[in-house]
Amino acid sequence: MPTPRPDLAAMIAPLARALMAAEQPVLDAHELTMWAYVVLLHLDEDPARGQGALAQEIGADKTRIIAVLDDLQERGLIERRPDPADRRARLLTLTPAGRRRRDDAQAAIQAKEELLLGKLSPADRTGFLNALLTLAALPREEIIGDDE
């Protein structure tokens, strides 16, 4: 019988909490909250069609994300502009300043991550990152599954 391994969540959750704790001083230095950083990362992919859609896409409470968006807009890091396809909706996009802030914070975070990844052999590092990218790209529904 193979040696039992810990469940994935039992391994990933403590690691995720430690990684977030390691990121916090970097985010503080870049004057970003964790949610603000998540918003800046997400908006690089595509403009978001409204705060409700953005909140759903990043897993945030739509009523709590409003203050984050207001702050980012006041600081010139994002823009809200009318959606040409639906004037009632607003498109959320990064400004050049938002892109620079996001890029600077991400570079600093990834520099810290390099120290951790350096504990792996080159082959393990490549395999770990490839596996993580593959699993992170799975739709939530596929991970949760349907037990019925």
Image: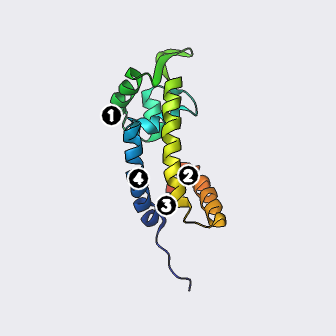
Q: In front: 33, or 7?
A: 33
Q: What residue type is labelled 3?
A: Asp
Q: Is mark 4 on a helix, strand or loop?
A: helix
Disc marking residue 147:
3
In space, the residues marked 1 and 4 are separated at their CA atoms by: 24 Å
In the rendered image, which quarter contains the N terminus?
Answer: bottom right
Q: Residue at x 40, y 61 (%)?
A: 14
The CA span between labels 2 and 1 is 25 Å
Instruction: Indicate which disc, 1 or 3, sits on the residue closer to the N terminus.
Output: 1
Real-space Cα separation, disc 2 to disc 3, in angstroms: 21 Å
Disc 2 residue crowd, few under 14, some 14–19, many 20+, Cα 10 Å: few
Local SS, label 3: loop
- Foreground: disc 1 or disc 4: 4
- Give the image location of residue 132, x and y in percent: 58, 56
- Find out whether the residues at labels 1 and 4 contact each other: C-beta distance under 8 Å: no
Label tally: 4
Q: Earlier in the sequence, mark 4 or mark 2?
A: 4
The amino acid at mark 2 is Ala
Judge by depth and name the residue closer to the eye, 39 or 112: 112
Q: Name the residue under label 4.
A: 22
How far across and down, in percent of the image, does residue 82 sit? Answer: 49, 15
Q: How far apart are marks 1 and 3 (CA)?
A: 32 Å
Question: Which badge, 2 or 1, is on the more N-terminal residue?
Answer: 1
- Name the residue tied to disc 2: 136
Compared to 32, does 98 lie above or below? above
Is 99 placed left or right of 131 in the picture? left
- Residue drawn 42% across and 48% down? 23
Residue 87 against residue 13 in the figure, above or below: above
Classify 10 Å Cα crowding around label 4: few (below 14), some (14-19), many (20 and above): some
Return the x and y of residue 81 as percentages of the image width and height. 49, 16
